[in-house]
Image (cartoon, grey):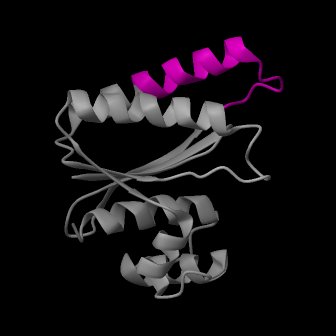
Amino acid sequence: MILGIDPWIKKLWYALIQPDLKIVDAGILKMEEKKFDRVEQYHRMLEIHDFFEDMIKKNKIEKLVMERYFITDFNKKNVEFLYWMRGVVMTLAMKNWIEIFEYTPQELKKNITWNPKADKQTVQKFITKIYKLEDIPEFHDAADALGFAFLGTRK
């Protein structure tokens, strides 16, 4: 199976698929807290660790495909925590001999739509076609998680 992850601060989107594109599980880990200090960040990492550790124990995951981040003016306040979250998931993958692949948002767009500058709605439409979904994913992050998982079928 292939696990695709689109992590963000208060929301982490994931998609677990089979190589034939059957969606096994997909969803979001949401943080409900209004404040987000260091202690909440540590608790959030533990929550993420426990969730994915349980998923790995229950499923034969062979590949993890995750968004690769780079620092911009938009995300520089949160990049430290994003890298911690990624580190937690990557450590679990390494510990369980799961191959890790990373793609930037532009690489995801290029591989899904053939256009590295495609807008979010275009990615959602392509994901709908790739997975033969009845409806377009409501959130672009959900489509991205499915997109990352799809890229794992190509490696």
Q: Position of residue 19 (x, y in %)?
A: 20, 64
**Residue sitting at x 65%, y 79%:** 121
Q: Residue 32 or 79: which is nearer the viewer?
A: 79
Corner quadrant of residue 101: bottom left
Main structural element of the magenta stretch: helix, strand or loop?
helix
Task: List the single residue furthest toward the bottom.
Answer: 114
Left or right of residue 37, residue 109 in this image: left
Position of residue 5 measured from the top left corner of the image (x, y, whole percent) = 45, 50
Q: Is residue 17 magenta?
A: no
State the image coordinates of residue 76 (x, y, percent, origin top left).
Answer: 74, 43
Say left or right for 59 vs 140.
Answer: left
Q: Report whether residue 125 is seen.
A: yes
Q: Nearer the viewer, residue 43 or 108?
A: 108
Residue 30, visible in the rendered structure = no
Residues drawn in magenta: 30-50
Relative placement, left or right, of 25 versus 140 is left
For residue 99, above or below residue 133:
above
